[in-house]
Amino acid sequence: MSGRVVDFARSAHRHARELLPWYLTGQLDEDQRLAVEAHLRSCAACQLDLQWERELQAALGGAPVSRAWDEDLALAQLRERLDAPPNFLERVRRQTRIAAGRMFDPPQRWLGYAVLAQLAIITVLAWNLVDRSLMPADYRTLGAAPASAAPANVLVVFDSNLRERDLERILRSVGARIVGGPNEAGGYLLAVDPARQSSAVDKLRAEKAVRLAEPLKLGASP
Amino acid sequence: MLGVPNDRADRNSPPNGLRAEALAPTLDEQILIERIALRDRAAFEDLYRRYFPRLTRFIERMVRRPQIVGEILNDTMFVVWRKAATYNGQSKVSTWIFSIAYRTALRALGRQSDPVEWEAPEVPAPPEAEPESSLIQRQDRRILDEALSQLTAEHRAVIELTYMHECACREIAQIVGCPVDTVKTRLFYARRRLKSLLAQRMGDLR
């Protein structure tokens, strides 16, 4: 029972304490005013608080305000804005500037970074499109000059019964690429890694379907 | 009605004696807003001059940057000019205008990155401020200003609206756009912080 009384008193105290500023300025409704007055009669702390509120109000009223500008001048400046025709582009520019400027403010900083990331992705995708449109096509006609600058360094003659599937396997096994041929004798020029030229030749010679495999000096032609 | 004296208010009083009644200024301002909605420039300039001292004080106290007060004030009144037709009369004209000023000031503060460098002008202590008088009176006003500078703009706004513009709690809730109970709590914590800062400053001076 006594606990309830204490709770009620605490609640009344907190309520009155919150309302003291508006009690001071006469902005409470009748019920609130009577409740605060009833509490004030029995609460020394709130009486002291009320006195402090009075002093604060007096001090705030006396505190200076700079008034660094003139009313007529300020109004004249605003008149210019009222007279100016609505400039859509200027408004858009201003809004954009404000929005861009605030994009990295703490509450929505993620938005700024998200937009930046999106821009980066768009740039990469756009560059890929432009890049491909500007580059020459990646295919050649049979009569066109070889695109590769890799030099031929192995001459090879295959068996005439060699199947295409075996040709592919042999070339892959030595890391070779056909860069020329066939010549009149049926010889092909291969390009292999110069460091592995001799081992490639040995491997080629070991193949049944290879009739001839000879290392060549760099820059040889059929 | 906001409580700051308005030296311009009587200059444009209508001759029918409306101002003799308590609600007359509010009704008068509502008529001005209606005229402004019809693009009446004279009505707008009348309202501008009525609110210039009040808004100047409120905005300066809130943002504490004299260099942007004029811009915020004119931005506020420009919105009043453009949006007068949307005023629905559900709140006082003063509440509506101060809510625009509050939001405009907060947006302007959000764009500022520089620290506040405002210094209160020198004002001699009043003769009645005796050494043995109260905590606030005993101190230089500059100390009060320093303490206010430690509060948030939202806290300063609520303090200014309560003590200097004598707004009711419900009006302040409309101005700052939050529930009435939040206003009570916000002012309670602002007072507590202010009291603590002043006590600390007094301790430093001893």
Image (spheres, helix red, strand yellow):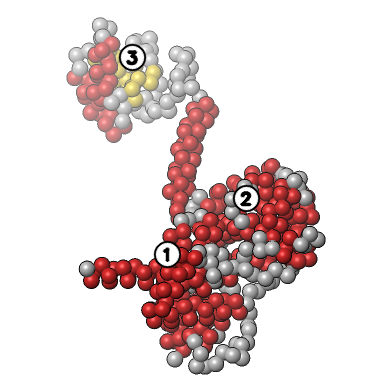
Front position among marks 3 and 2: 2
Which amino acid type corresponds to the residue marked 3 in the rendered image?
Gly
Please give the residue where the numbered disc 1 appears in the rendered image: B185
State the separation of the CA atoms marked 1 and 2: 28 Å
Please give the residue where the numbered disc 3 appears in the rendered image: A187
On what subunit does the disc labeled 1 rest?
B
Q: Residues within 10 Å of mark 1 (few under 14, many from 20)?
A: few
Locate residue B136, reporting x and y percent. 51, 83
Of B18 and B13, nearer the camera is B18
Please give the residue where the numbered disc 2 appears in the rendered image: B89
Instruction: Answer whether residue A126 is visible to the viewer in this image.
Output: yes
Q: Pointer 1 and pointer 3: residues touching (CB < 8 Å)?
A: no
Which amino acid type corresponds to the residue marked 1 in the rendered image?
Thr
Which amino acid type corresponds to the residue marked 2 in the rendered image?
Gly
**In the rendered image of this protein, does residue A16 appear above or below residue B172?**
below
Q: Quadrant of residue A72?
A: bottom right
Of B124 and A8, nearer the camera is A8
Q: Quadrant of residue A161?
A: top left
Front position among marks 1 and 2: 2
Q: Pointer 1 and pointer 2: residues touching (CB < 8 Å)?
A: no
